[in-house]
Image (cartoon, rainbow, N blue to C red):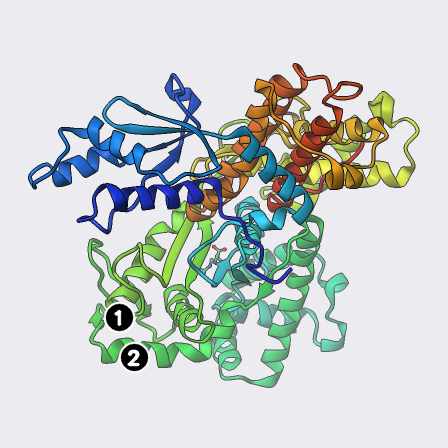
């Protein structure tokens, strides 16, 4: 299916369209009222409907001074309700309190929507976003320095955001903005020359751990003034483009890259590297433009940009004449807006870099690159996240090393999940290959999900036992819930493709209806998760889906052997399809057997 073709609007959008028509009919003199439609939240008390329209009060405030036939918000609500065009979506409406218009969806309509989705595929439920192309700048570790758990968070959250945007038919440029340029390279290159006078000998095996190599060279740099001088010259020669220096730099980057790649491969994450060095040639030119616009000032020997609301300025040329992190980010932002024509540029780093991005974006607004109004596009957004903590409440570390090697972490998750799987009765007869595949899916999925389910701006505590538990809000629990649904379908012995063609879904039981309603809300939840850049929204939806399936539907509605078997099997299938899409968007590999 071609992009956009056959797309079905979310329930919320379809209702908003109906209410838009109703509002036009209700107040013809107020043509620009935006309908305020929301799903009803069960937690907030009595539920009068599935959705509600909240326009009456605001509208009343707007029209009460003018000549109007209405006498208060409830009357406005009544009129809005009366003017909803007839629609097969709606079973009934009512007005509550100060004019809230409640809508109960038709269960037949929900059932038909589900069947259509099963036939046409879940991609027809892709949300509609107002952008065509986005840059997601994520992972972005630094060459030869540690790739730490913060980078793991950036990788996991960034990949999910990219997946959700891609599903919403946004073209995503997945950018790895690696720190491959900076003064540390002088020292690394000089140290490399010293250790390997013969450049042929340089390879990953010879260098071994690049972080240790970095440490050793730093030690040398700090203790030996002659070496220090050579290292400083090396930076100049590298930046001047001298072949020998360029080649050494390339080697070091390659070795680092191979290590990063192993992490990405395990996580199933795709990234395209455009490191800091890529933007280096653009910096002088971009700064020139900012200077011409009068943004750049002299301050204590450095060249800086002052922005609103921040006392310290953004340094764009250091007092020694060198460029820095900020100059690179300004050049990168310029490039992404003008060369790559991205409408939304999203950056993932820990919250510690919030001020840096705030200043870069404000500078870009001063330059007129970005609109001042944040609700307009093109837009740049920093997605900050909290720290990963250990059991002791401090920054996460492992016993033996100061920093956590990401590969070891993922290995441990896999090993632990493999041990748990081997203990399961049902897995006794599994072929070895299946045990391995399932342990990987469960182990890596657990690490990812434990991170994604939290509101990203808070810190989260890394705990293997918790994330690998099969109870509670964990990937393990959800993967098993999915596998259980698949096994219900398998056990029925029915061909789901046949049922889709000839069967019908009926939502007469309360549990069936509750499940159906939650399923048709998938699209708007993904849309919300994209708009707010919050993967936790999707995790919450998935967890609730699994809960509704079990507690409301499956524990009350017999599937196999019941008169409603066909319909109920189709509901099982729809649940499994939506769960798998959630897993996919969260970067978790589904399993089909437990
Ligand atoms: N390399 C940086 C770090 O490790 C993250 C880069 C984020 N992206 C950017 N465009 N500044 O902290």
Label 1: element kind: loop
Q: In the rendered image of this protein, does residue 64 appear above or below residue 587?
A: above
Label 2: element kind: helix
Identify the residue at image location x=86%, y=21%: 425
Count every numbered label the image shows and give the total: 2
Q: Quadrant of residue 162?
A: bottom right
Residue 423 coordinates in the image, percent (x, y): 83, 23
Q: Nearer the viewer, residue 110 or 280?
A: 110
Identify the residue at image location x=70%, y=26%: 568
Within-10-Å neighbours for mark 1: few <14, some 14–19, many 20+: some
Residue 564 coordinates in the image, percent (x, y): 72, 22
Residue 443 as seen in the image, left or right of residue 324: right
Residue 576 as seen in the image, left or right of residue 310: right
Q: Nearer the viewer, residue 333 or 375?
A: 375
Q: Quadrant of residue 312?
A: bottom left
Q: Nearer the viewer, residue 298 or 29?
A: 29
Q: In the rendered image of this protein, does residue 330 appear above or below residue 549?
A: below
Residue 78 coordinates in the image, percent (x, y): 26, 29
Residue, disc 1: 367
| Quarter occupied by the N terminus | bottom right
Q: Is mark 2 within 8 Å of ligand 1?
A: no
Identify the residue at image location x=52%, y=55%: 138
Asked if the residues shown at circle 2 and circle 1 are in contact, with their CB atoms under 8 angstroms apart, the answer is yes
Asked whether residue 54 appears in the rendered view, the answer is no
Identify the residue at image location x=93%, y=29%: 429
| Quarter occupied by the C terminus | top right
**Which of pointers 2 and 1 lies earlier in the amino acid sequence?**
2
Q: Quadrant of residue 61?
A: top left
Q: In the rendered image of this protein, does residue 124 appear above or below residue 194?
A: above
Residue, disc 2: 289
């Amino acid at each position: 299916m071609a992009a956009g073709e056959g797309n079905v609007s979310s329930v919320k959008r379809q209702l908003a369209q109906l209410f838009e028509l109703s509002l036009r009919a209700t107040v013809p003199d107020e043509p620009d009222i935006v309908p305020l439609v929301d799903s009803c939240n069960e937690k907030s008390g009595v539920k009068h409907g599935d959705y509600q329209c909240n326009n009456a009060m605001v509208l009343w405030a707007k029209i009460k001074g003018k000549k109007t036939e209405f006498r208060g918000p409830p009357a406005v609500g009544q009129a809005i309700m009366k003017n909803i065009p007839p629609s097969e979506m709606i079973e009934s409406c009512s007005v509550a309190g100060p004019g809230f218009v409640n809508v109960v969806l038709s269960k037949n309509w929900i059932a038909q929507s589900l069947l259509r989705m099963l036939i046409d595929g879940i991609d027809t439920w892709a949300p509609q976003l107002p952008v065509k192309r986005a840059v997601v700048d994520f992972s972005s570790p630094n060459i030869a320095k540690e790739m730490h758990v913060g980078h793991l968070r950036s990788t996991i959250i960034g990949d999910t955001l990219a997946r959700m945007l891609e599903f919403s038919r946004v073209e995503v440029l997945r950018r790895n903005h690696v720190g491959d340029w900076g003064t540390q390279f002088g020292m690394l290159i000089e140290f490399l020359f010293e250790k390997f006078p013969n450049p042929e000998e340089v390879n990953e095996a010879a260098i071994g751990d690049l972080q240790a190599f970095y440490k050793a060279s730093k030690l040398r740099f700090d203790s030996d003034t002659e070496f220090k001088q050579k290292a400083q010259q090396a930076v100049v020669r590298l930046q001047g483009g001298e072949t020998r220096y360029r080649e050494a730099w390339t080697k070091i980057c390659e070795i680092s890259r191979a290590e990063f790649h192993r992490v990405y491969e395990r996580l199933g994450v795709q990234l395209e590297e455009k490191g800091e060095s890529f933007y280096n040639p653009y910096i002088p030119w971009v700064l020139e433009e900012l200077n011409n616009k009068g943004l750049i000032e002299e301050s204590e020997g450095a060249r800086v940009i002052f922005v609103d609301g921040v006392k310290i300025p953004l340094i764009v040329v250091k007092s020694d004449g060198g460029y820095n992190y900020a100059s690179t980010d300004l050049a990168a932002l310029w490039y992404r807006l003008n060369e790559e024509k991205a409408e939304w540029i999203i950056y993932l780093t820990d919250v510690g870099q919030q001020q840096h991005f705030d200043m870069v974006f404000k500078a870009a607004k001063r330059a007129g690159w970005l609109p001042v109004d944040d609700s307009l596009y093109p837009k740049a957004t920093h997605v900050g996240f909290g720290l990963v903590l250990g059991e002791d409440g401090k920054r996460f570390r492992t016993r033996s090393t100061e920093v956590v090697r990401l590969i070891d972490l993922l290995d441990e998750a896999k090993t632990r999940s493999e041990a748990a799987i081997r203990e399961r009765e049902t897995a006794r007869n599994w072929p070895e290959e299946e045990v391995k595949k399932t342990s990987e899916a469960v182990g890596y999925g657990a690490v990812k999900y434990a991170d994604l389910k939290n509101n990203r701006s808070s810190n989260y505590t890394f705990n293997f036992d918790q994330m690998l538990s099969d109870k509670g809000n964990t990937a393990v629990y959800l993967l098993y819930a999915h596998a259980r649904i698949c096994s219900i379908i398998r056990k029925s012995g029915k061909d789901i493709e046949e049922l889709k063609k000839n069967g019908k879904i009926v939502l007469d039981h309360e549990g069936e209806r509750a499940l159906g309603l939650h399923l048709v809300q998938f699209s708007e939840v993904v849309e919300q998760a994209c708009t707010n850049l919050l993967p936790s929204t999707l995790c919450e939806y998935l967890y609730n889906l699994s809960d509704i399936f079990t507690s409301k539907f499956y524990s009350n509605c017999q599937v196999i052997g019941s008169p409603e078997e066909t319909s109920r099997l189709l509901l099982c299938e729809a649940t499994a399809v939506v769960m798998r899409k959630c897993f996919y968007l969260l970067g978790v590999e589904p399993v089909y057997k437990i």
